[in-house]
Every structure is written in structure tokens, then in C-alpha cells.
Image (cartoon, rainbow, N blue to C red):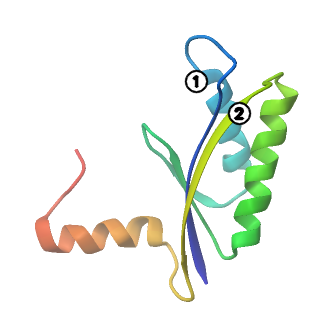
Amino acid sequence: MSVLMSLAMFPTDKVGSKSKEVGEVLKIIKDSGLKYQLTSMNTIVEAKTLKELLDLVNLCYIKLEELGCNRVYAVMNFDIRTSGEDRIKSKIASVENHIGEVSK
């Protein structure tokens, strides 16, 4: 099984840049050992089960709570497939096979 998650999570009760808090969330994701890719709008994470990702989201929220965030915005999208692995890269490669390089 391969589960991809797109996650955007940040506090809404802080003024200005949220990069410090987003960085703390990213540390949790990085320390999880799961494959991930940071983008300018969200982070994509791949796991073998949905539960792994839901547990990870909970850890990220707990971290923001520990940082004193009283209100958190979170958006998650999931792509759950019974087969495959390393789909973070293979999905992009599949498109590039048709039209060439897509990111610069």
C-alpha cells in the first residue's frame, strides 16, 4: 500500500511570517523517517498506511500546541493506493514522460 498526503498546517493566531512554526512541523515530519517533499504551499509525505500519516498529523498538531498556538489551520489531501512505492517521485516522472521536465 502507498498513501500520499499533502499537508498544510500553520497557526492562525500569530502575526507575520509562520516559517518558524512551519519549520517545527517539518522537523516532526523529517524525524518520522517517512519520505517527504517540502513545496512552497505544503508538504507531501508518503507512508505505507493511512494510520501512520494520521498519527504524524497529530504529532505535528501537538508540537504547535506546545509552541503556544491557540488556533491552527490544517488542510490534508490523501491519495491511497493498494500498490506502489516512492510515488512522490514516480507520479512526477510519469507526467514528465509525456511532456518533459515540469519543474525548474
Tag on residue 7?
Answer: none
Q: Position of residue 2 (x, y in %)?
A: 58, 78
Residue located beneath label 2 in the image: 72
Q: Where is residue 91, by image quadrant? A: bottom left
Q: Where is residue 96, by image quadrant? A: bottom left
Q: Residues within 10 Å of mark 2 (few under 14, many from 20)?
A: some
Q: Position of residue 66 (x, y in %)?
A: 87, 29
Q: Position of residue 10 (x, y in %)?
A: 64, 32
Identify the amino acid type marked 2.
Answer: Val
Asked if 33 appears above or below 61 in the picture, the reply is below
| Cα–Cα span, label 1 and label 2 | 14 Å
Residue in view at x 69 percent, y 19 percent:
13
Q: Residues within 10 Å of mark 1 (few under 14, many from 20)?
A: few
Q: Position of residue 37 (x, y in %)?
A: 50, 51
Residue located beneath label 1 in the image: 19
Residue in view at x 25 percent, y 50 percent:
103
**Towards the viewer: 33 or 42:** 42
Provide the secondary structure element on which disc 1 rests.
helix
